[in-house]
Image: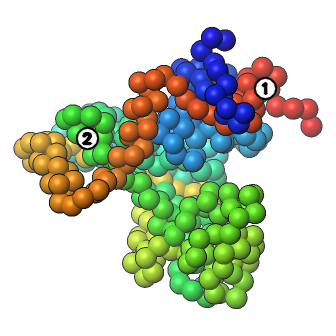
Amino acid sequence: SPARRVSTADTVTVTVAEAQSKTAAAMRKIGWDAEDAALQAEIMTAAELCGNNQGLVKMYNPSLMAPSPGAAKPTIERETPTSAVVNANQSPGMLAAVNAADLALQKLRSQDGPIAIVTAYNTSTSSGQLAFYCERMARQGAIGIALANSPEFVAAAPGGKPIFGTNPVAFGIPQAAGPPLTFDMATSAIALFGVLTSKAKGEPLPEGVAYGRDGGFTTDASEALEGGAIATFGGHKGAGLSLCVELLAGVLSGGAVVGQCESKKLAKSWGHTMIAIQPDLLVDGFEAKAAAVLAATKASGPSIRLPGESSARTAAERTAADALPIPKQIWESICRTAEHGLPEQ
């Protein structure tokens, strides 16, 4: 089509709409209904738009994106006016998280208080870029907070066995001018995707981010994944924060509890917690005051960059140009799947 052009030997550039619609078509072809296909395509395309490494790469092996046997649409449990629990029923992490975030915002808008909380459990795939869900809430004027846990990849200290997930936490702060401020970080020293990428490319890990089988630091990604562990960031401070995410996203959500199950990976029930806050019920002029803090922070020294600033700039540039560069192999996989579905086994 005229909207598509090959920019390099390794990259195809398409419009944002084409990327999202073609991905949605591929998701429908592998078994999702129109609503769930569109939601997952939106989430993956949004991550790709801002240069996040958890975007359309998920479509490189589309069989991993197909519905799990016996999976059903998420259902709502333990509902109150200000809270709820989403039973994902083995739907993907992206659907569990977006249902929880949207329901938290709905709960916030349908009552007089300043806060709503929704958790999700019974999913066993990554929700991808956690900032997406916080930004989704913040674009509607709410402060969004998201926490997620995952299987045992991260050790609490050198010499320890894996006990935590990479356990990310993210925030979305609404701004009167421009997109929301977002901050999204794993509590591990490196994201799992980073370790998997190093292994696939045969490249060494950065120093100090993973442990080997002997409990000492290693730069060998294979050893870290097979008998070793990922480290927390910042030593005991990162370990403490990871523990809190484990409690607030894993335990509070109703997900698998480490210490009560053989493994979280086998239990296939990872947790999310989404919190939505209406700032004007707590303080006057929140967005103006937040803008003052951000401006003062930027002005406090040379070359200071705010969280999410680079991602927001990349997304704005790509949106303005209506041009999204996608690795050629991934785009070909999306197009092939949209036309033919999964290959015959």
Q: In this figure, which residue is indicated by the disc labeled 1?
A: 336
Q: Secondary structure at mark 2?
A: loop
Picture residue at 56% right of the left edge, 78% below the top: 208
311 over 340 or under it: above or below: below
Q: Earlier in the sequence, mark 2 or mark 1?
A: 2
Query: Which picture quadrant has residue 19?
Result: top right
Q: How many marks?
A: 2
Q: Residues within 10 Å of mark 2 (few under 14, many from 20)?
A: many
Q: In this figure, which residue is indicated by the disc labeled 2?
A: 174
Which of the image's four quarters has the C terminus?
top right
Mark 2–mark 1 Cα distance, whole angstroms, equals 39 Å
Locate residue 182, reporting x and y percent: 35, 48
Amino acid type shown at disc 1: Arg
Query: Which picture quadrant has residue 39?
Result: top right
Q: Comparing marks 2 and 1, which lies closer to the viewer? A: 1
Q: Which mark is residue 72?
A: none
Locate residue 270, reporting x and y percent: 57, 57
Q: In this view of the protein, which residue sits in the foreground, 137 or 54?
A: 54
Q: Inspect this view and state whether residue 337 appears.
A: yes
Picture residue at 59% right of the left edge, 20% below the top: 18
Picture residue at 82% right of the left edge, 31% below the top: 342
Which of the image's four quarters has the N terminus?
top right
Left or right of 342, for residue 276: left
Q: Are marks 2 and 1 in contact (CB under 8 Å)?
A: no
Q: Residues within 10 Å of mark 1 (few under 14, many from 20)?
A: some
Query: Which picture quadrant has residue 110?
Result: top left
